[in-house]
Image (cartoon, helix red, strand yellow):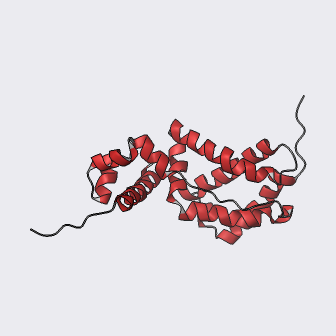
Amino acid sequence: MPETRRRSAPATRAAILEAARERFGAQGFDRVRLRDVAADVGVDPAMVIRYFGTKEGLFAAAAAFELNLPDLTEVTADELGHVLMPRFFSVWEDDAGFLSLLRAATTSEAAAVKMLELFTSQVTPAVATVAADRAPERAALLGSQILGLALSRYVLKVPPLAHMGRAELEAWVTPVIRHYLTDPAAPVPT
């Protein structure tokens, strides 16, 4: 009888998460089935359920990530975009969890809630350190720009946006980031 090689629990869990990130990123939340993720890894679907419980649990784990935004307290207004954009590019291009979450947030309320949690827990506090005033509004405006840009570039692949190099895109977006975070706020209508 040939010897079978045992897989460690942490390695199996990590492989399931990676397969789930790829599937959620490519197909969105609704079209992914637990049995397909299990097949990608070569495990029984019961193993996926054992580690993550439900599809929602698997998605929550696959979409969990840290933006790791830099400390902005010493960054000048003109440099904010140049400091933030490389980090955003890294998240967009190197973290399948973010694109999975972004795709799924367009059709799944649970994913939309997860995206909102990400911004309220990570983006708003980072922005508050440099916002001239009204940090929640400024963080929301920045979020609309960044999420819209990611959706247009990586999900919808809108030309020419999808084909722009990083430097060109950064040059376009940097003044908008500065405006949203540091320019005088629009007066509140009475």
The mark total stands at 0
Give the residue furthest to the left.
Answer: 1
Horizontal side of 93 relative to 188 (left or right) equals: left
Q: Quadrant of the C terminus?
A: top right
Horizontal side of 124 relative to 57 (left or right) equals: right
Question: What percent of the width, then of the height, locates residue 148?
Answer: 64, 50
Q: Nearer the viewer, residue 162 or 10?
A: 10
Q: Residue at x 69, y 47 (%)?
A: 144
Q: Residue at x 38, y 47 (%)?
A: 32
- Quarter-of-image position of residue 134: top right
In the rendered image, is residue 30 in sight?
no
- Quarter-of-image position of residue 85: bottom right
Question: What percent of the width, then of the height, locates residue 90?
Answer: 60, 65
Q: Residue at x 53, y 49 (%)?
A: 101
In the rendered image, is residue 137 in sight?
yes
Horizontal side of 87 relative to 29 (left or right) equals: right
Q: Residue at x 59, y 52 (%)?
A: 151
Horizontal side of 170 relative to 104 (left or right) equals: right
Q: Quadrant of the N terminus?
A: bottom left
**Vertical position of residue 130 compared to residue 89: above or below:** above
**Vertical position of residue 118 compared to residue 12: above or below:** above
Q: Nearer the viewer, residue 89 or 59?
A: 59
Question: What percent of the width, then of the height, locates residue 87?
Answer: 66, 64
**Vertical position of residue 134 compared to residue 93: above or below:** above
Question: What percent of the width, then of the height, locates residue 70?
Answer: 72, 62
